[in-house]
C-alpha cells in the first residue's frame, strides 16, 4: 500500500452512501486524485469542516494498484474558501473555476502550473481582487497551459505582429491570426483584448488589478475564451452555461422591475 501526503486544492465533494464522501482534489506532483473519505458525513467525523470546495488542505491518502479511488485517511484545512462562496455570484464562480480543473487537469500527472494558477487565483479572490478580472485571467492561463491559446505576439502563419496588423479568430480555429492571413471570415479581435492577453503573460493578478482593463474589454475576453474553449473541448462547461442562464434570468427580472411610466413600483 502506497501512503502519500501533500498539499491539495479541493475540487469536488460528493456524498457516498450514508456516511462517506468522494473527494476530488488537485496536487502539485500527483496531479488530480479522487478518493473516499470514510465517515466524512458523520456528525463527529475527523473530517468535519476540513473538506470544502476550493479549500486548501494537507491530505494523506493511500493507494492500492488497480483501484480507481484512493482512501483518504486525514485532511487538515490550511486555507478555507467558504467566504468566496457566501453569495450566488461567488458560488457560481467557484463552480466555474473547479470545472476547469476537473476538465483540464489529468489524473496522476504532475502539473505544478495548474496547481499554482488555481491556488493564486483563489488567494487573490479572497483578498478582494475584482472577480471578473480574476476569472478572465484564469481562463486565459488555463487555455495557454493546455497549449491551445498561445500569447498573441505574432501571427502563427506569417510572423507579423498582431498588435500592428490586427487579429482575427477564424471559424473553427483555436488561435488568433493576423487580418491578412485570416481574411474576412471570423471574429475580429480588438487591440484592447490583444493588450490584455499580452499583459496576462507578464503580470500577476495583483499587478493587473492596479490598472484594470475596461469592463467592455473583459466581456470581449470572456466571449473569446469561451469560443476557443468550446472548440478545443467540443462542448461547453456546465457551470458556464449555468452562469449565463442565471445572469440572463437576473437581467430579465431587473428589466421587469424597472418603472415604465416614470414612477417606482
Image: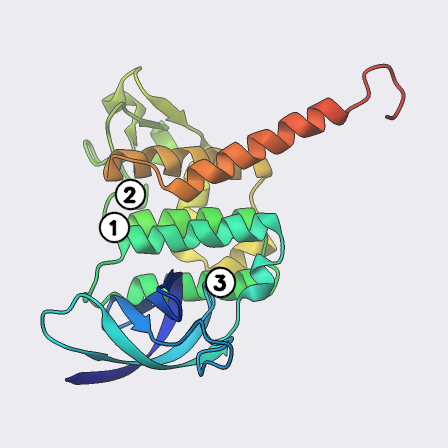
Mark nearer the N terminus (3 vs 1): 3
Residue 227 place in picture, x, y as percent: 35, 32
- Which residue matches tag 1? 146
Quote the CA–CA distance across marks 3 and 1.
20 Å
- Mark 2 element type: loop
Of residues 57 and 130, which is closer to you in this image?
57
- Which residue matches tag 3? 122
Image quadrant occupied by the N terminus: bottom left
Of residues 102 and 186, which is closer to you in this image?
102
- Mark 1 element type: loop
Of residues 136 and 66, which is closer to you in this image?
66
- Which residue matches tag 2? 149
Residue at 35 percent across and 64 percent down: it is 17
- Mark 3 element type: helix
Residue 264 place in picture, x, y as percent: 88, 26
- Residue 63 to residue 127: above or below: below
Mark nearer the N terminus (2 vs 3): 3
Residue at 55 percent across and 36 percent down: it is 246
Quote the CA–CA distance across marks 2 and 3.
22 Å
Mark 3 and mark 1 residues within 8 Å of each other at the beta carbon? no
Residue at 30 percent across and 16 percent down: it is 185
- Residue 66 to residue 195: above or below: below
Give the label, 2 or 3, closer to the camera. 3
- The answer, for residue 40, to whether it is visible in the render is yes
Say the numbered circle drawn on residue 106. none
Mark 2 and mark 3 residues within 8 Å of each other at the beta carbon? no
- Quarter location, residue 255: top right
Give the label, 3 or 1, closer to the camera. 3
Q: Residues within 10 Å of mark 2 (few under 14, many from 20)?
A: many
Image quadrant occupied by the C terminus: top right
Amino acid at each position: 500500500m502506497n501512503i502519500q501526503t501533500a498539499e491539495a486544492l479541493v475540487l469536488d465533494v460528493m456524498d457516498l452512501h450514508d456516511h462517506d464522501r468522494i473527494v476530488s482534489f488537485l496536487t502539485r506532483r500527483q496531479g488530480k486524485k479522487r478518493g473516499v473519505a470514510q465517515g466524512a458525513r458523520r456528525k463527529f467525523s475527523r473530517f468535519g469542516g476540513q473538506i470544502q470546495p476550493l479549500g486548501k488542505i494537507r491530505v494523506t491518502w493511500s493507494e492500492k494498484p488497480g483501484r480507481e479511488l484512493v482512501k483518504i485517511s486525514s485532511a487538515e484545512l490550511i486555507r478555507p474558501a467558504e467566504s468566496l462562496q457566501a453569495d450566488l455570484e461567488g458560488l457560481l464562480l467557484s463552480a466555474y473555476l473547479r470545472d476547469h480543473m476537473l476538465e483540464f487537469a489529468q489524473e496522476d500527472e504532475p502539473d505544478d502550473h495548474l496547481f499554482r494558477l488555481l491556488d493564486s487565483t483563489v488567494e487573490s479572490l479572497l483578498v478582494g481582487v475584482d472577480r471578473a478580472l480574476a476569472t478572465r485571467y484564469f481562463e486565459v492561463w488555463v487555455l495557454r497551459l493546455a497549449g491551445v491559446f498561445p500569447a498573441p505576439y505574432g501571427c502563427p502563419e506569417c510572423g507579423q505582429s498582431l498588435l500592428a496588423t490586427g487579429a482575427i479568430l477564424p471559424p473553427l480555429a483555436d488561435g488568433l491570426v493576423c487580418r491578412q492571413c485570416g481574411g474576412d471570415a471570423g471574429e475580429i479581435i480588438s487591440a484592447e483584448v490583444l493588450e490584455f492577453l499580452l499583459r496576462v503573460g507578464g503580470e500577476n493578478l495583483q499587478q493587473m488589478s492596479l490598472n484594470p482593463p475596461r469592463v467592455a474589454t473583459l466581456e470581449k475576453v470572456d466571449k473569446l475564451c469561451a469560443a476557443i474553449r468550446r472548440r478545443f473541448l467540443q462542448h461547453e462547461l456546465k457551470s458556464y452555461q449555468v452562469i449565463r442562464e442565471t445572469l440572463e434570468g437576473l437581467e430579465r427580472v431587473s428589466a421587469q422591475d424597472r418603472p415604465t411610466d416614470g414612477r417606482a413600483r
